[in-house]
Amino acid sequence: MTVVVVKPWLHLSLFDRRGLDTFTADLPEVGTWIVGGHSPGGVRACQVAPDADALLLLGSYCANDLSERELPVLSLAGSEDRLSTPEKIADARYLLPETATMVEIEGAGHASFGDDGPQDGDGTASISDEEMDTEVSAEVEAFVDSFG
């Protein structure tokens, strides 16, 4: 699996206006493109998702409507996330295709999805980084296997 980590302008994903083709053009050997992100990165991934093969949301939700798209979607939420709360993610569920897979990871906080340390307003995670890595990896692997 090839992973492309986008470095957006000013480190703010919502300011990045590059299309998916900016990255796909550099890697023509990659046949399937899953766009995804954490928090605002997920919101940005939703914006380019119509040009992708699938969408992965990590403690995030869409602000644009993808509900009519035939797009595989995996949305991972954390039970202790107090920023992209499970409730906020559920409230935005209508913007995703009916077939979207929604998973809540018990004990995960907002910061559990990244490596940027504690964040003001977040809950306290009760899952270790190692457990989180294992859980997320298993969910993503099953997701990719389901359509790949």
Image: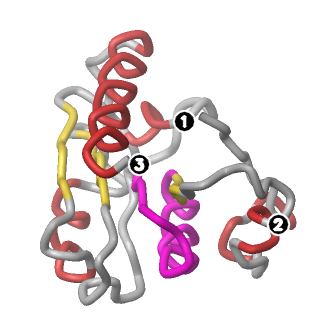
Helix, strand or loop at mark 2: loop
Q: Is residue 45 magenta?
A: yes
* Residue at x 39%, y 26% (from the top left corner): 137
Q: In this figure, which residue is indicated by the disc labeled 3?
A: 58
The type of residue carrying mark 3 is Leu
Q: Which residues are magenta?
A: 38-58
The type of residue carrying mark 1 is Gly
- In this view, the mark in front (3 or 2): 2
Q: How far, Cα to Cα, is label 3 from label 1?
A: 9 Å
| Residue 51 left/right relative to 111 | right
Q: How far, Cα to Cα, is label 2 from label 1?
A: 27 Å
- Foreground of the two, 3 or 119: 3
Q: In this figure, which residue is indicated by the disc labeled 1?
A: 114
Q: What numbered label is drawn on residue 78?
A: none
Q: Does 137 appear above or below 100?
A: above
Q: In this figure, which residue is indicated by the disc labeled 2?
A: 25
Residues under numbered marks 3 and 1 in contact, where contact means CB atoms less than 8 Å apart: yes
Q: Residues within 10 Å of mark 3 (few under 14, many from 20)?
A: many
Quadrant in which residue 11 is drawn: bottom right
Q: Residues within 10 Å of mark 2 (few under 14, many from 20)?
A: few
Where residue 96 appears, as percent x and y from the top left, is: 26, 76
N-terminal of the pair, mark 3 or mark 2, is 2
The type of residue carrying mark 2 is Ala
Residues under numbered marks 3 and 2 in contact, where contact means CB atoms less than 8 Å apart: no
N-terminal of the pair, mark 3 or mark 1, is 3
